[in-house]
Amino acid sequence: MMQPKKLKIAVIGNKDQAALMRLAGVDEYRVIEDDRNVGEKVREALREFEKDTSIGIILIPKNWTDYVDDLIKYIEKKKTVTPVIVEIPPRFDTEREDVREFYKSYTKKLLGFAIEIQRPVERND
């Protein structure tokens, strides 16, 4: 029987996003600060992560996807299972729709069906 391969998660983000994702267990990260070369740095990081076959998921802030839209489409067209590009809300964007709904709709787009995780019901035995 073939053993499943453990794939890593990578994040491209600012200092705060990378720190939070590292606390959550993200293995690989690239910190990019907003400056006039942010687009080039995001493209370089995505290319690097896309070539690494040990990375299964790449997290990137939604406001940076315009810099790499062509690369994301190229990766999606390759028809490979990995890496999966997941857009995360930028910074602390409270104007965004409900985060639960955001990821529910994104999962539906990615997989073709929606997944909803329910919190376990606490029992008072």
Image (cartoon, rainbow, N blue to C red):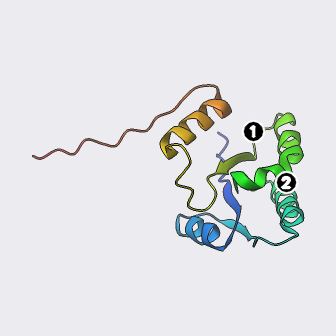
Front-most of residues 36 and 74: 36
Q: Can you identify the residue that label 2 sits on? A: 67
> In x, y percent, where is residue 95?
55, 50
> Which numbered disc flags the more N-terminal residue, 1 or 2?
2
Residue on which disc 1 sits: 81
Mark 2 secondary-structure assignment: helix
In the rendered structure, the answer to whether residue 96 lies left or right of residue 7 reads left
- At x 56% / y 68%, what residue is drawn? 20
Number of labels in the image equals: 2
Q: Secondary structure at mark 1?
A: loop
Residue 57 visible here: no
Nearer to the camera, 80 or 47:
47
Q: Nearer the viewer, mark 1 or mark 2?
A: 2
Task: Classify mark 2: residues with Cα within 10 Å, few (<14), some (14-19) or many (20+).
Answer: some
At 88% from the left edge and 63% from the top edge, which residue is drawn?
44
Disc 1 marks a residue whose amino acid type is Val
In this rendering, would 42 be left or right of 62? right
Q: Position of residue 15 (x, y in %)?
A: 66, 74
Q: Label 1 neighbourhood size at 10 Å, few (<14), some (14-19), many (20+)? A: few
Q: Residue at x 30, y 42 (%)?
A: 120
